[in-house]
Image (cartoon, helix red, strand yellow):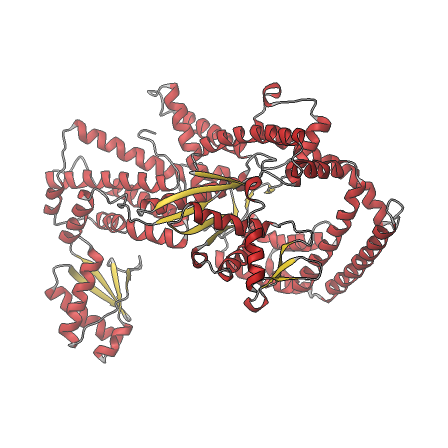
Amino acid sequence: MNLDQSLKSEIQKASTAVFNQTVEQLQLQPTNAEFEGSHTLVCFPLTKLSRKSPEETAKMIGEHLVANSGLVSRFNVVKGFLNLTIKDSVWAEVFASIYSLQEYLQLPANGREVMVEYSSPNTNKPLHLGHLRNNFLGYSVAEIYSALGYNVHKVQIINDRGIHICKSMAAWQLFGNGETPESSGLKGDKLVGKYYVKFEKEFRIQLSPILNKIYTGDFSLFNGTEKGLLENLIASISEIESKIETQTEEIDFSKLTQFGFRAQVLLESALDGNILWKDVLKCFDDEEYKNLDAKIRDQKKVELAKILKPILALEDKLLLKKDEVKDVAQNRTSIMPYAQDLLRKWEAKDSNTVQLWKTMNGWVYTGFDATYKRMGVDFEKLYYESNTYLLGKDEVLRGVEQGVFFKKDDGSVWVDLSSDGLDQKVLLRSDGTSVYMTQDIGTAILRFRDFPKIEGQVYTVGNEQEYHFKVLFLILKKLGYAWAEKCYHLSYGMVDLPSGKMKSREGTVVDADDLMQEMVDEAEKQTRELGKIDEMTEPDIKALVEMVGLGALKFFLLKVDPKKRMLFDPNESIQLQGHTGPFIQYTHARIKAILRKATSMNVEVQADSLKSVDALEGIEREIIFRLNNYHAKLNEAAREYSPAIISNYAYELAKEYNQFYQSVSIFNETDPAKLKFRIALSKMVADVLKASMRLLGIQVPEKM
């Protein structure tokens, strides 16, 4: 039984009977928790038919429904909103139809296909906390679409070439002494990451005195052309710094007290030159603002950014100039030219260089595979940058011929997107080499050739790449690819820990393997302290704590709107109470214990018998309403590309079941029909919780 459709049909009949006109469009929504009822009809649009006030219109429809409909038992009107209470017998029928439907949790194949890209790491370091959010988001979105009947293709592109890869290779050649994963006992990705960090540390050591000389006016290390360039850059830097100082003097800092204590502290640090001005905006990620309403917090962040806008714009220019200085200075180190030489050799297919590249990447892939296995994510197809980085060049040249792109005097190829509110973007350098955008153009086209039936691609990539994907999708449209309209950037915010932002080059990255192990260790500690595992074998205990620890991690990272930057609190995530994965897992285990007891009592449930129950408790109605809303939430999560919708749905369902468990008798119920109904209701809640958590990549235990 589709309750919403049936109810809309009854309302349309009521409208025809009362107003002598049929309503084509009805606005039906869930009733606010503060009012009685489950479904609310918005009656303001209907006043055109009734020619009466919204309240009178609602009352007329409500009275007709109660008198003539087999669905509605009573109603109440709040202004122009008609709140409807559905008959208990109808709820029982709705539940019986859900309970008997074999394909309720997995819809049949719909013949449609979609591709989801996620993970896409570099092969110079292990996966970190940011990769965890990325993988969990992408995998979950893929599972949500799969549950709706889509054929989903999970892919990633592995960034396995370029200067960042050669940095690890260079450090290994210079400092590795032949170290391998076997000789060191390290996972392959961790070993390669160790040498990436080693490169960066050595590079900074070599670069620091060179930069010191430059910024004190000593250009003796550089030739005439480089010297002239550096002199101009230093002059520009000095000019921008003076402008920033002038701008800070014009700011009325008394207006900034409204942003809280943490903002004041960071402002002082920025004034003293200890942090960047843009880092002042991170004050809103502090514990001080944790309990502040998200909309208010975002609004305050916008207000502060507006006040600091002149300084932030200048600071961006300053940082670009300093990067240009660094680009010149790095050529006077010994280690950066070494890495650049390795890149040139790789591009020239030097056999020794290519062999080292294959060996070290092989170490990384073995490490990645172990991490992915523990994460519980998988891929149908892997794309490698080394195979795709030249793709797109032909498309760009075709675009030049068609007038979509243009060449500059130096031979470089550009696209002008200024009429679309964007900027000009280089697609081929003057020497004919491609840029990342060129590669992404080619890769997107290749994927549609590999999977010609897909309707679109979902790219799971951090929000720092939002502009990149706007440009990419627009370029693909201009090249005539209609499917570009259905490409979507699943943008997500950075993950912070209470101790601060993740870092990678300095070797203080929040390692994914380490964090997963810490979560499992904490789950084991708490599980043993609770002392409810005496009858479990040691392997069963290990499986349970793995399930709980990783479930806590995944749920916490997925319960937040992907677009938002988030603070991951390991201690909060592992709690058995509250908006956590373990709370839902515990609820599932509790229900399974109830079902085992029912089996031991030979309680058998037939779907047809469920319709005989005609009196329900309020919490039972709420649970059935929630169960009946599963498909709507599934579709909403797919439409919004947001596993957070499923996370919150599962939490609300678990919370309602716990209220049911506390307030309604199950095994002390003397009415056999009600007993069976409550056992069936419990089973359905367990099934939906399990299915919902599976969409998040989370397993649920039978015992806990």
Position in image of residue 170 (x %, y %) = 70, 32
- Comparing 167 with 243, the one in front is 167
The quadrant of the image that shows the C terminus is top left
- Which residue is at the far front? 401
> In the image, what residue occupies the spot 47% across and 60% down?
480
Position in image of residue 539 (x %, y %) = 39, 20
> In the image, what residue occupies the spot 64% across and 41% down?
162
* 16 horizontally vs 531: left or right: left
Position in image of residue 510 (x %, y %) = 57, 37
Quarter assignment of residue 578 = top left
Query: How many numbered tags mark residues here?
Result: 0
* 608 horizontally vs 278: left or right: left
- Comparing 598 with 543, the one in front is 543
**Residue 430 seen from this side:** yes
* 153 horizontally vs 45: left or right: right
597 w.r.t. 385: above or below? above
Position in image of residue 291 (x %, y %) = 49, 52
- Comparing 507 with 116, the one in front is 116
- Comparing 521 with 434, the one in front is 434
- Which residue is at the far bottom? 51
**Residue 579 seen from this side:** no
